[in-house]
Amino acid sequence: MQDDIRDILRKVRKYKEISIRKLASEINSSEDTIIRIENKRIWPNLKTLMSICDVLSCYIKIEHDLSKYEIDSDNYIQYDIRDTLRRVRKYNLITARELSDKINVSVNNIRSIETQRYNPTFEDVIKICDGLNCTIKLYID
């Protein structure tokens, strides 16, 4: 099991001496949302996570076998959510329905994530990556 990204983000925020108030302001969110994310009461959606990563100068990389795909705030909307997860799923020769059954995420959610109609929680991304044998890593600049 991978380390919880919420713990890592909290540690990075504190290390960089960025207050909850400043982070919330920078990403146009509430302080309560940041607190709930850091206290593991909620999972951020990907848009929020990418905004947090921008402020903290970090990025997330999804790695799978020979192929490596990055999620970063500059291109994740056009490329990474839609293409990375779909490409890795197809690389594994798994249908959306088979993946859905394997990870207990609805097939409609998987299809909506791959076609950029749904902004998933990071928890769903972790489930999908686990189902596809991907590794999610957080890199800090």
Image (spheres, rainbow, N blue to C red):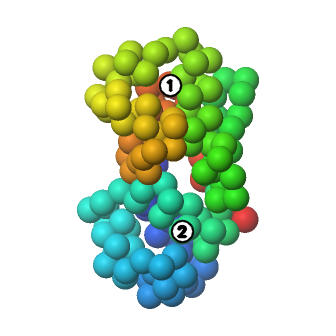
Identify the disc placed on residue 132: 1
Quadrant, the N terminus: top left
Residue ID at (42%, 77%): 29
Question: Number of callouts in the render?
Answer: 2
Quadrant, the C terminus: bottom right
Residue ID at (37%, 18%): 97
Marks 1 and 2 sit apart, C-alpha to C-alpha, by 25 Å
Q: Quarter of the image holding residue 135? A: top right
- Residue 12 in percent (x, y) is at 56, 70
Q: Is residue 140 left or right of residue 81?
A: right
Q: Is residue 129 left or right of residue 105?
A: right
- Residue 104 in percent (x, y) is at 29, 28
- Identify the amino acid type marked 2: Ile
- Identify the amino acid type marked 1: Leu
Q: Is residue 86 left or right of residue 103?
A: right
Q: Which residue is mark 2?
A: 52
- Residue 139 in percent (x, y) is at 66, 55
